[in-house]
Structure formats: structure tokens, C-alpha cells
């Protein structure tokens, strides 16, 4: 897609695609990139220390409290606030690093940490509990500094896995419900993965039900139980999110945005957007550009 949202990739020269970066280094070296909307092909876990910035994930401002963990999935559009008063560090890693087995992939996709099936992407901690996570990050940094050997990837992956399991447990302790394992979750996750790859060309529920080899009714039962939404609502949500991204972060015309998203009739695209958002694409763009 020819949008103007910059996509940052993990350094190809890095053999093991996991890293812990101090935020003061990041905000000094990459300031211009950070304060503009961007996507990455890797996952972020921010460990905010004694600071209170506002971090923007798509169209949601997230107000950070001291000693907070913030989880951002790959390919989400986010940006730093312009004050750049960020203290702490960020743990980043790729699918290639973590997902060496099918179970790894399933763990990451069904976890309540990165998955936007859970509404709140943060975990608030006290200073003592926060140190458990910074200690693991320190162990990751120390292991990365050692010479390469056959056990290095395994050790680093185990440290990262421990970090994520501890985070998952803490999030559930704070009242977030674990996604119930089973066929409904499996169908829902598969549907969302297929949607992410195909939403530009496939917009019918039946298209996805066929790909999953289940009926539309069964897919609807699954998404209703897991997300409380119908498959059609989820398809609309994904299309509308990308529409909003292009309206705010690109200079494409309304007609061009509709075409990018697979709408051949510009008038129908405008009606579709207004029906689902109660505003026209032009009004939405003007509202956000004024902020």
C-alpha cells in the first residue's frame, strides 16, 4: 500500500533480533522518526521509569504513570509525544527471534499482552515489582554482550519468555481476563490473521469462513464469544482503522484512499465511512489535522 506512514524494520545486520535500548538513547538519536507516526515489524515493551509522558497508539493517547509497562504489537501505528520526556528502556524483538515453534506463535498471538483483544495495553507496577522486569532486561543485555555460542539464542529466548509470562500473570492479577483457550479462540485468531493479510480485497464474512473451512454461523459464534463482536463488525473495524490512518497520516485524496482500500466507487466509500463513524472522511481528516 502506498501510504506515507514510515515503516521501521529491525536492523538486518543483527543476528539475534532482540534488543534492550535505553529510552534516552532512542529519543536522542531518532527524535524525528519517533515524534511522527510510524510502524515497525517488531514488538515493543516499554519499561517507563519515573516519568509521565503521553504515548500515542493509532488514535488513542495513552497517559503513562511512573513504573508502567506498555506493550505494542508489531505493525501498530504509534508515536512519541513531542516533549520526549521518556525515562526507562524498551525491549524489542521480532517474530523471527521468538517464534521458533508453532506453540511460540500461538502464545504470542493469543496473549493478552500484545493482542488488542485486551483494551488496555499497559501494566502499572510499584517500584519493587518493576525491578523484576528491569532485572530480566539487564540479564538480556548481559547475554547479548557475550560471545556467540550454540546456547545464546535459547538463553535469550527463555529470558524473554519469562518476562512475558510474568507480565501475563501480572496483567491477569490486575483484573484482565485470560483469553479462554479452545476452538472459538483458535477460529477467531485465524480469522484475524487472515483479515490482516486480505482486508484490501476480501470484505465478505463468507470469504473468510471459506478460508477457515467453517460456516459463517460458526465463525460468528466464535467471534461473539471471544470478542463480543460479529465477523462483519471486525472486518469493518479493520477497514476503518486503515482508512483513518490514511486520512490523517497521508496526503492521498479521499478517492485515492478509497481505491487503496478496494472501493471502486468513491461515493459508496464515503457512505460506508459515514455509516460506520457518523462523520465523513473529509470531516474526520479536518478534525484530526486541527489537533
Image: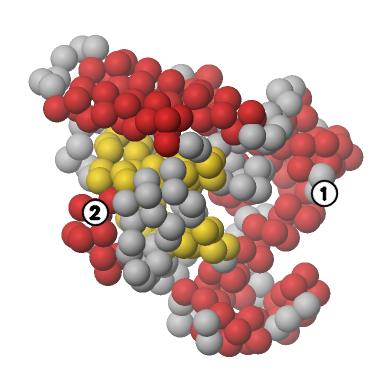
Which mark identifies residue 88? none
What residue do we see at 27% from left, 37% from top?
19
User: In the structure shown, which secondary structural element does the residue marked by tag 1 occupy?
Assistant: loop
Of residues 18 and 82, which is closer to you in this image? 82
Of all residues shown, which one is farthest toward the right? 217
In this view, the mark in front (2 or 1): 2
What residue do we see at 20% from left, 61% from top?
28
What residue do we see at 77% from left, 30% from top?
184
What residue do we see at 67% from left, 55% from top?
202
- For label 1, the residue is 230
Dot 2 alpha-carbon crowd within 10 angstroms: few under 14, some 14 to 19, many 20 or more? some
- Tell me where residue 39 appears, x and y as whole percent: 41, 57
Of residues 190 and 74, which is closer to you in this image? 74
Residue 42 appears in the rendering: no
Of residues 285 and 47, which is closer to you in this image? 47
- For label 2, the residue is 24
- Tell me where residue 22 appears, x and y as whole percent: 25, 46
Looking at the image, residue 4 sits to the left or right of residue 146; the answer is right
- Mark 2 or mark 1, earlier in chain: 2
Looking at the image, residue 113 sits to the left or right of residue 95; the answer is right
Residue 158 appears in the rendering: yes
Amino acid at each position: 500500500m502506498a501510504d506515507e506512514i514510515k515503516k521501521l524494520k529491525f536492523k538486518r545486520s543483527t543476528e539475534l533480533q532482540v534488543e534492550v535500548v535505553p529510552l534516552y538513547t532512542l529519543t536522542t538519536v531518532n527524535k524525528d522518526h519517533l515524534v511522527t507516526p510510524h510502524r515497525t515489524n517488531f514488538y515493543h515493551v516499554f519499561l517507563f521509569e519515573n516519568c509521565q509522558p503521553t504515548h500515542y497508539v493509532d488514535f488513542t493517547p495513552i497517559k503513562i504513570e511512573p513504573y508502567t509497562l506498555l506493550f505494542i504489537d508489531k505493525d501498530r501505528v504509534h508515536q512519541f509525544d513531542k516533549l520526549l520526556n521518556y525515562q526507562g528502556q524498551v525491549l524489542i524483538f521480532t517474530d523471527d527471534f521468538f517464534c521458533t515453534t508453532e506453540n511460540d506463535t500461538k502464545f504470542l498471538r493469543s496473549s493478552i499482552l500484545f493482542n488488542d483483544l485486551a483494551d488496555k495495553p499497559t501494566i502499572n507496577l510499584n517500584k519493587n515489582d518493576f525491578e523484576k522486569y528491569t532485572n530480566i532486561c539487564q540479564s538480556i543485555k548481559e547475554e547479548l554482550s557475550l560471545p556467540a555460542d550454540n546456547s545464546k539464542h535459547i538463553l535469550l529466548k527463555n529470558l524473554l519468555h519469562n518476562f512475558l509470562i510474568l507480565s501475563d500473570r501480572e496483567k491477569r492479577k490486575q483484573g484482565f481476563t485470560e483469553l479462554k483457550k479452545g476452538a472459538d479462540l483458535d477460529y477467531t485468531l485465524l480469522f484475524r490473521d487472515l483479515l490482516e493479510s486480505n482486508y484490501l480485497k476480501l470484505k465478505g464474512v463468507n470469504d473468510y469462513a471459506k478460508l477457515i473451512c467453517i460456516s459463517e454461523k460458526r465463525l460468528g459464534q466464535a467471534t461473539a464469544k471471544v470478542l463480543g463482536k460479529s465477523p462483519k463488525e471486525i472486518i469493518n473495524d479493520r477497514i476503518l482503522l486503515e482508512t483513518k490512518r490514511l486520512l490523517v497520516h497521508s496526503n492521498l485524496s479521499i478517492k485515492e484512499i478509497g481505491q487503496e482500500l478496494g472501493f471502486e466507487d468513491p461515493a459508496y466509500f464515503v457512505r460506508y465511512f459515514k455509516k460506520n463513524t457518523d462523520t465523513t472522511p473529509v470531516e474526520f481528516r479536518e478534525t484530526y489535522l486541527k489537533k
